[in-house]
Image (spheres, rainbow, N blue to C red):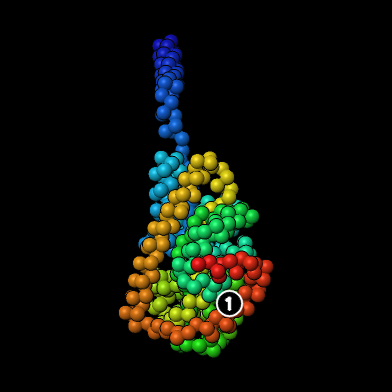
Amino acid sequence: MKRFLSIFVALVLVIGMLSGCGAKQEETQTSQNPAKESEKTEPIVLRLADVHNDGYPTVIGDREFARLVEERTDGRIKVEVYPGGQLGDEKTVIEQVQFGAIDLTRTSISPLTEFQKKLSVLMLPYIYRDKEHMFKVLDGPMGEEFLNGLSEANMLGLCWYDAGARSFYNSKKEIKTVEDLKGLKIRVQKSEIMLDLVKALGASPTPMAFSEVYSAIQTGVIDGAENNWASYLTTSHYEVAKYYTVDEHTRVPEMILMSKMTFDKLSPEDQKIIKEAAKEAALVEREEWAKAEAEAEEKIVANGNIVTRLESKDEFQKAVSSLYDKYGADYKDLIEKIINTK
Ligand code: GTR
């Protein structure tokens, strides 16, 4: 018994010494080497949502943004990109960005107009002469004001992406005139201005998440939708809705949107890095966009889809002019300024 007791006491002593030693070692290590301490700080991980899949121009832009941020913060900030709508549909994600549950998203401004009415001005039908005109506006002081103006809604726009122009497509018939759209059930983004636009053309709008459109056309729940060339291709909507009319009713810019809650927690240096990285990533996206848009059009035509090019878009333009009264009445000067931007 005596022997057993002494072995037990010896064991307790040894264990005590060992653990004491260990703790000390750690203490001396950290105090002697402060660099180690900073190495140990966990990186800030920010989540960025996108409804498009990898390889789509916006996701290429998102990944470039993530790369630049990580590089310029020496890995202190990591942006994790979640493509393919993994974090939810566009409108739901924006709501989460507003409350900081998701840090960033790449979004079309259509659903964002629900959070800031004034933004509708930037997607009024036929407001831009062409893409160059749109970027002249967006890359100037007006565009900057819109990006910062979202702080009213607890969010911040970081940069402008290209998304081409949106046109109608359907599974039923060729659309050559506004009359041809009458009664067709057309899916729209969750956005009041898009709903009104489709209504103004005499069709019947159905708001729906992007991911549900393919099967809704396939099963006949809706007759068609409207989108740019690249989305029409990558979603495979072109397989179930073979008629595409190049009416280009609206050019809807897109952006990287950040939660103000997340942004405000960062140091001014990191805020600057985030803003600059987004602007640079946008240039990459725009280049990728131009390539993807041309390739998509080519593939769709080669696939044998019925692509209708209108001789004039005047009739469409006239039919949707009422949207300027409803969405532009409070911003007449701004609209003027946009139209007069050369
Ligand atoms: C695409 C856009 C997406 C989403 C989608 C839609 O052109 O890039 O962000 O808005 O359209 O129609 O839901």
- Estimate the x, y position of residue 213 in percent, counting from the top left: 48, 73
Residue 57 is at least partly visible in this image = no
**Left or right of residue 312, residue 294 in this image:** left
Quadrant of the rendered image containing residue 194: bottom right
In the image, residue 341 above or below residue 24 = below
Q: Secondary structure at mark 1?
A: helix
Q: Residue at x 36, y 71 (%)?
A: 294
- Estimate the x, y position of residue 104 in percent, counting from the top left: 51, 53
In the image, residue 190 above or below residue 106 = below
At label 1, counting other C-alpha atoms closer than 10 Å, the crowd grade (few under 14, some 14-19, many 20 or more) is: many
2 or 124, nearer to the observer:
124
Toward the right, the furthest residue is 330
Q: Residue at x 36, y 77 (%)?
A: 300
- Amino acid type for the residue under numbered disc 1: Leu
Q: Residue at x 55, y 47 (%)?
A: 263
**Residue matched to label 1:** 197
